[in-house]
Amino acid sequence: MKAKRKCLLLTLIALMGAVVLTGCIPGDGTYTKADPAGFFWGIWHGWIAPISLIGELFNHKLHVYEPINNGWWYDLGFYIAIISGFGGLSLSRKHKAKKDK
């Protein structure tokens, strides 16, 4: 019985987290040319890129990448987050595989 409750609670927390994260998806009209997305928003958008991709499937006005940004700095933050998130996963797998041998 405790395992079912724990699983239900974790599922509920994951769903709530996904809903909260979708409030910051790029392309939602928050940014203007006078106030573009910057470096730290690039990092945030890189971290939530998988969730943004799923959101874009259901709403074509949303994007994985913010079109109104301040250029190079936004790009740098975005790619740092993408590489650290997804690249970090592959590095941990290689490290774990070496331990198993």
Image (spheres, grey):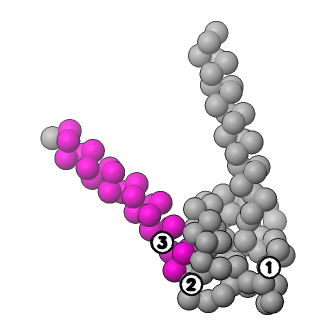
Q: Which label number is shown at residue 69?
A: none
Furthest residue toward left: 101
Q: Residue at x 74, y 84 (%)?
A: 36
Q: Which label number is shown at residue 73?
A: 2
- The amino acid sitting under disc 3 is Ile
Asked whether residue 9 appears in the rendered view, the answer is yes
Measure the C-alpha gap from mark 2 to mark 3: 11 Å
- State yes or no: discs 3 and 1 in contact (Cβ < 8 Å): no
Q: Quadrant of the N terminus?
A: top right
Q: Which residue occupies the foreground of this view, 98 or 74? A: 74
Q: Disc 1 marks which residue?
A: 31
Prevailing secondary structure of the magenta residues: helix
* 88 up-or-down from 76: above or below: above
Upstream in sequence: badge 2 or badge 3: 2
Residue 89 image-quadrant placement: bottom left
Q: Nearer the viewer, mark 2 or mark 3?
A: 2
Q: Which residues are magenta?
A: 76-100
Q: Disc 3 marks which residue?
A: 80
- The amino acid sitting under disc 1 is Tyr
- The amino acid sitting under disc 2 is Trp
- State yes or no: discs 2 and 3 in contact (Cβ < 8 Å): no
Upstream in sequence: badge 2 or badge 1: 1
Q: Is residue 32 left or right of residue 4?
A: right
Tag 2: Cα neighbours inside 10 Å, few (<14), some, or many (≥20)?
A: some
Tag 1: Cα neighbours inside 10 Å, few (<14), some, or many (≥20)?
A: some
Asked whether residue 57 appears in the rendered view, the answer is no
Q: Is residue 20 left or right of residue 3?
A: right
Question: Residue 56: x, y in percent?
Answer: 74, 66
Tag 3: Cα neighbours inside 10 Å, few (<14), some, or many (≥20)?
A: some
* 60 up-or-down from 31: above or below: above
Q: Residue at x 66, y 87 (%)?
A: 70
Measure the C-alpha gap from mark 2 to mark 1: 15 Å
